[in-house]
Amino acid sequence: MRIGNPATRAAVAGIRRRPRQVLLTGLAVLVATVFTAGSVLLTETLRADLVDAGVRTPDGASHVVVVASSADVGALEPQLREVPGVTDVAVGYRGVTPVVGSGTGGQWLVSSDPMAGPLTTLPAPSSGAPAGPGQVLLGSGTAGRTGLAVGDTLTLGGRRFTVAGIVDLPQEPLDSLVLTPPDAASLGSVLRPARIEVAGDAETAAVRAAADGAQVRTADEQRAAEVAELSAGVGAVLAALSVFVGVALVAAVVVVGSTFRIVLARRSRDLALLRCVGASRGQVVRSVLTEAAVTGAVAGTLGVGVAVGAAYAGLAVARMSGVDAPALVVPPMWLVGCVLLAVAATVAAALAPARTAARVPPVVALGAAEATEAHPPRARLRLPVAAALVVLAVLTAALGATGTEPLGALGLLALSGMVLFAALVTAGPFVIAGAAALLRRPAARSATMRLAVANAGRLSRRTAAMTTVLALGVGLTAALLTGVAGAGASARESIDRSYPSDVVIVASEAQDPAERAAAAQRLAARFDADPLLQARVVGTEVHVDAAPGADPDAARTAVGNLSGGAVAVVWTADVRAETESMLSIARLVGGALVGATLVVAVVGVGVTLALSVGERIREIALLRTFGLTRSGARRSVAAEAGLAGTVGAVLGALLGAGYGWLALGAMEMDDAGGAPWGQLLALVAGVAVVAVLASFAPMRRAGRVEPAQGVTA
Amino acid sequence: MTPPVVAAAAVELVRSYGSGPGAVRALAGISLYIPSGRFTAVMGPSGSGKSTLLHCLAGLDRPTSGQVLLGDTRLGELDDAALTRVRRDRMGFVFQDGNLLPHLSAGENIDLAVTLAGRRPDRAWRNELVERLGIGNRLRHLPSELSGGQRQRVAVARALLGRPEIVFADEPTGALDTTSGRELLGLLRACVDDYGQTVVMVTHDPLAASVSDQVLLLRDGLAAGRLDRPAPDAVLAALGALTADRPAPRTTVVRA
């Protein structure tokens, strides 16, 4: 391969001969790319699946009339039937409403379907028969969850329905059932008519004329609109994910930059030789950047491969365990984009180290000087910049905290967090040097600890890189934990306030408050007649509790039977359970999102220590000749990892909790009690332990060093 | 013999490290010239400033004061980029050891300076060099697969390929056994004799210095004498005189 100048060729040849080193350098980028590509695969698969399942317009439809209210439907339906060429018309109803039956309860997704003819969207029932009047079809997932079977009865909007069959529905986000359009219409305000589907070969103009000004779309237009709407939702998911992808990439850039610094320092003699025999600084910089590009391409390709493989495996496992998993969508252009992003990130990371490396004095080639971190970080340059960044971060945070618009305030806080991270990266070496100076006295008793502290302080730049990235990962996690804890406390409090009883029922939708109150009174009287229930009227709502000692299930059934005609029946226990499950989903999804950054950070600790130990073989050997034990050598590496881990985790936890608290304030949830100290403590301890575990390989290597290597290496 | 043309010269060269009372003057105002087409050896006890002198002459280090001339170019007036070009196009380097890039083959290492300049090596000249240096069959090998003597011969080929005005050698035999060292010195000598190459070599080995046309002696950062066509014994005696703090011999010893 003859590319570029010989300096570049030397760098590329070096990669070919030491592929392991490239992997080590690019590991952080690899992890970040797995996350990037994983996000792309997730959203594209989601998009395909949603579009696949979410396009509701039946193949037999020619036009769809979008209607605004139930009042229109009664007049429109017969008019549309009269249009020449129209063979069938079906009103589509949809709503979320409580359904009660044999011990089940909660909010169901209820929709209508003509059950037969060109406008049905349902396949043949997997058991039972299509629903007739007074009958419903259950989604197969719902049937599995609730245990309801053909012939069982359900109460819906005060009416009793029999389960006629079970059918496969494309989506069952909630428990779902389907009934006939006439039954749906008879339930009154419980369900909303959203659209009228028309079959046949009528002229669009004729349909439009019959629609009385309601919006008319051809079926194709309607499908396109549905796809666009669904894709917009997925686009929002992708946008949210890309924020976290970006953070993980920033973390990877810091880690890889530090790795390049170490690798290039080790190669400074070769680079000096190049400079000596006439390579310009530009040629040296270009050689390093080419190496970075190759590293990024390799790491990116591997990362994409891992992501695709893991996605296939994950979906296969899901399918084997019976989950209806969608087919994986692998978008080639997006994945090429992921590799390019990895290349760009790696090259960006190598930029500063490459410039430093090109400044190596040519005399170094003659063995005049040996240096790892040639220049100590320049305090005069870094500290003012860091101070300015801190001020900027505080100002942005103050602006965010006093802001009135929650989303804008959150954005400002996120910006402030990133600026503060930049300040930490800039001032990191001095923070580490300071921490090392502080720890020097307490560490003085143990030789291994003293070594670890000395090494961390001496190579403050690389220790700072691993620490700051760790602080970023931990900070995000801490902010998430604090935010979720606060939001949870606030949600629970608001539930307690709004739902003081077991059930809250809205009796009427009438415009007149007096009429609503009267309806509530009538309903309350009906409930009170039941010995299982106690009801009282609060404003226009009926609050119902189970009588002391009454069986909760029996009370639930009684409420279901007696609440016919009510607009909404809300069980406090359901709301509570739903809130808790949403909180745990938030914690899980958030954890997965910030987890990538945390993984990148831990990889950073492992890689940095691996390279540092490789560089320090002679020194460790020398210490071994002076009587350092094998386990002592190992312990000093572990102590260094633990030191970086603890400093990074504590810093991150404090900053993250602070920002989480500010974010809660911005969303006006500041009365939620206290930070989740237990969780934060566990987080710090966990990260410190993982950092030590990540140093396992370098620890072993340090332990294997023989004293003789100090002389010959 | 016609007076030699000057290839390079140092004029009142001072190089001090550090400042204040702790400052060390490695070069204390030395003036000398390197004749063109000759083999010059620089010798002196440890700390005499011979390495610093070489670094300054080669533009690898900047003198605190004084001038370095390469031909009629004043190195002190050049910026880093220009100095890099001068090193690339007008100088050659042979160092003690480990001065080949480990991941490039011997052949690629030879072409390094020329290709860095974006030029193609002169094929005929390159073939003659590798034949003359006896490394024609080693060109595809990596430095780690070569013996120390072969590595140094690759370095000599690299230094000569661009037909530089001057070749700097810093203890080129330092890491070699006696036989390989002698061979290498013979080759350097032949380069001067056959191609008219100018060579400046820093060494502490009197035997190495004895192949040169002239030996410049240094002490405490100043020129301390000069021997023309010296025999090893004469070099040894002159060195001994330097370290024993006696006046340096002024005699000219002509080799038989």
Image: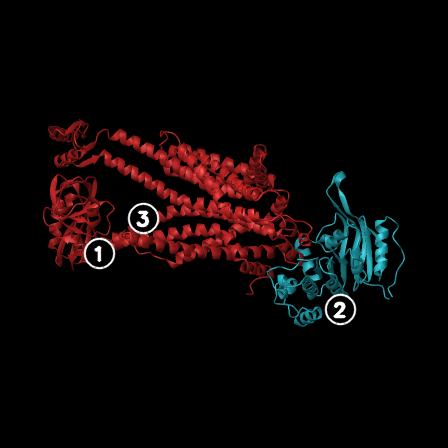
Compared with A402, A139 (above or below) is below
Q: Amino acid at mark 3?
A: Gly
Chain for disc number 2: B
Q: Nearer the viewer, mark 3 or mark 1?
A: 3
Q: Label the cyan chain with its letter.
A: B
Chain for disc number 1: A
Q: Find residue A301 and name its label.
A: none
Q: Position of residue A466 (x, y in %)?
A: 51, 43
> Which of the 4 quarters of the picture holds residue A18?
bottom right
SS for dot 3: helix
Q: Nearer the viewer, mark 2 or mark 3?
A: 2
Residue lying at the far bottom in this picture: please name it.
Answer: B124
Q: Mark 1 — residue?
A: A219
Compared with B158, A58 (above or below) is above
Residue A33 falls left or right of residue B137 = left
Q: Amino acid at mark 1?
A: Ala
Q: Position of residue A205 (x, y in %)?
A: 18, 56
Q: Position of residue A288 (x, y in %)?
A: 56, 55
Q: Position of residue B203 (x, y in %)?
A: 77, 56
Q: Find residue B195 and name its label.
A: 2
Is residue A173 something one can see in this rendering?
yes
Q: Residue at x 46, y 53 (%)?
A: A342
Q: Residue at x 47, y 34 (%)?
A: A395
